Amino acid sequence: MQDCDQGPDNFTFPMVLKGCARLSASKEGMQIHGQALKLDLGFDVYVMNSLINMYGKCGEIKCSRRLFEEMGSLRSIASWSALLSAHAGLGQWNACLELFRRMSFEGYKAEESALVNVVSSCAHLGLSDIGCSVHGSLLRNFSGLNQTIQTSLIDMYFKCGRSKDGLSIFTRMKDKDVFAYSAVISGLAMHGKGEKALKFFSDMLEEGLKPDEAIYVGVLSACSHSGLVDQGLKCFDAMTVPTSRHYGCVVDLMARAGKLEKVYEFIKRMPIEVDEISWRTLLSACKVHNDLKLGEFVAKILFRLGLKTAGDHVLMSSIYARARKWDNVAETRLDMASRGLSPIPGFSYVVVKRKAWTFFSQDRSHPDSDEVYEMLYQMGWQLRFEGYSPDTTEVFLDVGEAEKRQLLEGHSQKIALAFAMLKTERGSKIRIVKNIRMCNDCHTYTKMISNIFKREIVVRDRRRFHHFIDGKCSCNDFW
């Protein structure tokens, strides 16, 4: 074009920038940005929107934000949509929702494609109240929701612990595609409803739809979370060319059921290269089932492959602690420190009055922490009266029993639960989201709280959902 003395314009630049975005070609995108500035097109609204999108897709979110703020009154709905998409694409869910709130406050109405990103953010954060509000906005402002939006809503409701709402949307869908079935099957898997997930899988096959990789991952996960080992293996055997994700699911399926030796034999026979996920899944199972010998063996393999992370060190430290090998615990922690590795801190958050409150272990940062800890003390007293005995094997430090009980009391989930008990109406449902697997002690504790205080408590941990009602959990103590 330039060789023919025909310069690019505000239609050409967006097309080229779109290509850079697809290829994640940030260097070339920056060069094109420079060209646009030289031709006095750097502040053209179409070009700027394309630049926001390009920088966002390339992971340069600071550049996207800077351009967005520089636009000022030039901002259009497309500008907001581009930045919303950029934040969501990078997994910056809170930033996406903050931008959406600002957008609404300034009087802009998001387009359908932008609202998919908002719904996705609500799904990942487990914020059902905001998700419901967005759903309502979609119904009011758009006549007939497309497949993508409906599938996003299904996913959101399942991830927010509202499986009935997710199923309701799916049931009303006229044309159910593979993606919709995938959302439902994966959602049911998270809630431990394996039999129901298999029924939907059967319905999908009867409709003539061909299952893809994601569908089989959902089915195998559903079997894994429900202890349906035979059904899961049957589905796996029916696959033509399983991927590493599917092999990883089978490892998880058998590992959860405690079949560790069979898992190891299965891994050895795998016709593809064993990835770190499979080894790490087995290591995690060694912790759950107290298999020190196999745990040490797997940890050495991860170390030899150069894949040992902070999480692996923590797992191995936990395995040693349960075996009361405190010298090995200390050695593992020193090794982790010498490598500059830091474990990801566990946290729990709970939504109260449409605001998410985050708590870490032993957290006293909240302004009302004195009241929260008083509630925590009262809850603990009532539980002990009902026969609760803290599971001190969940403390992986060589300290006395009294200190172990104190450390257990300060787990983030318990603090979040006490806060919710304090700040919400009696009898109302409590929803908590965790970034790590729930420990055995917190599981027992929450079951008893649900019974004593007559509260329905829904906890989403890193692995699945737990619905606590009247002293029982939906996982049937299998997670």
Image: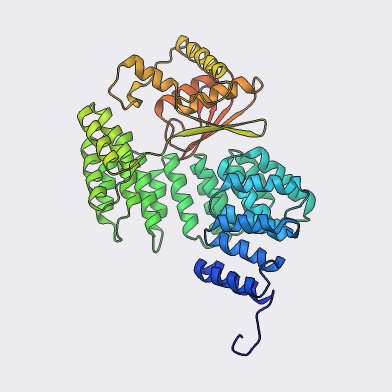
Does 152 sit left or right of 448 as displayed?
Answer: right
Viewer-closest of 147 and 216: 147
**Residue 33 x, y percent position in the rendering:** 59, 69
For the point 64% across and 59% down, the residue is 67
**Residue 43 x, y percent position in the rendering:** 69, 66
Does 392 sit left or right of 328 as displayed?
Answer: right
Does 54 sit left or right of 114 as displayed?
Answer: left
Viewer-closest of 318 and 155: 318
Is 220 drawn above or below residue 163 in the view shown? below
Does 185 sit left or right of 221 as displayed?
Answer: right
Is 332 drawn above or below residue 46 in the view shown? above
* Total marks placed: 0
Residue found farthest to the bottom: 4
Viewer-closest of 388 and 124: 124
Q: Report which quarter residue 181 is drawn in.
A: bottom right
Q: Report which quarter residue 405 is drawn in.
A: top left
**Residue 249 x, y percent position in the rendering:** 39, 50
For the point 48% across and 15% down, the residue is 380
Viewer-closest of 431 and 371: 371
Residue found farthest to the top: 385
For the point 56% across and 67% down, the residue is 21
> What colouring style does the render use?
rainbow
Residue 153 in sight from this viewpoint: no
**Residue 113 x, y percent position in the rendering:** 67, 58
Indicate the quadrant containing the N terminus: top left, top right, bottom left or bottom right: bottom right
Indicate the quadrant containing the C terminus: top left, top right, bottom left or bottom right: top left
Residue 2 in sight from this viewpoint: yes
Is 127 drawn above or below residue 236 in the view shown? above
